[in-house]
Image (tube, rainbow, N blue to C red):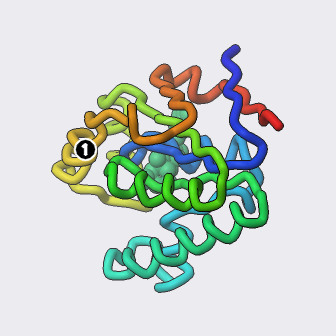
Amino acid sequence: ERELVVPAKGLVVLVGVSGSGKSTFAARNFAPTQVVGSDSCRGMVSDDENDQSATADAFGLLHHLVDTRLRRGLLTVVDATNVDSSARKRLLRIAADNDLPAVAVVLDPPEQLVRDRGAARADRALPDSALSRQYRQMRNGLEGEGFHEIHVLRDPQEIDSVVVRTRP
Ligand code: GTP
Ligand code: MG
């Protein structure tokens, strides 16, 4: 079974299109308080996790939470698509400002599986074109952006069974 080692003090940036399984992965491998999610932040500033007009405020809150937790030396996981390099750069900057490493965990299961799951999802109706755009964005590699490590998980069974360990 695959082991995924992440720094005990640092930032874990999940990267994956909507429906790739980020929130499921985060819930399985981390404590709820370690996970800072764009949807929960959107909910906290709008009472509606799908209210797109709250996006700027939601990310303001997310970045503040990440910065505060890292300043306190706490392992922090960002549950947001992060397919856009500017979103990742912002997070990398917050980690660097706190002198802590950032690692990326890319969840990239087969596109057909993601589309099938999306069609079955009641909580969110993402237009096909939006998902396609996220896939195009994700093709831009993460190499050279400043991540200490980039873990890419493609096999759905591996995504389901990987064991996360922390390295002091
Ligand atoms: P967004 O929050 O929209 O960006 O999606 P996400 O990446 O957080 O995906 P999420 O974890 O919500 O998973 C999307 C859907 O796929 C949900 O209905 C999950 O129940 C399902 N799902 C996620 N991971 C797995 C998995 O490992 N196995 C199975 N069978 N379903 C999964
Ligand atoms: Mg999610």
Q: SS class of the residue under badge 1?
A: helix
Residue at the disc numbered 1: 137
Specify the farthest residue to the left.
129
Q: Nearer the viewer, residue 89 or 108?
A: 89
In the picture provided, is 19 more to the left or to the right than 66?
left
Residue found 54% across the figure and 77% down from its top: 61
Q: Quadrant of the C terminus?
A: top right
Q: Nearer the viewer, residue 70 or 84?
A: 70
In the picture provided, is 104 more to the left or to the right than 18?
right
Specify the farthest residue to the top.
1
Q: Nearer the viewer, residue 53 or 70?
A: 70
**Picture coordinates of residue 45, whole percent (x, y):** 51, 84
Whether residue 148 is situated above or below residue 91 in the rendered picture: above
Residue found 68% across the figure and 49% down from its top: 10
**Picture coordinates of residue 62, whole percent (x, y):** 54, 70
**Picture coordinates of residue 109, whole percent (x, y):** 42, 28
Q: Quadrant of the N terminus?
A: top right
* Quadrant of residue 89 within the rendered picture: bottom left
Q: Residues within 10 Å of mark 1 (few under 14, many from 20)?
A: some
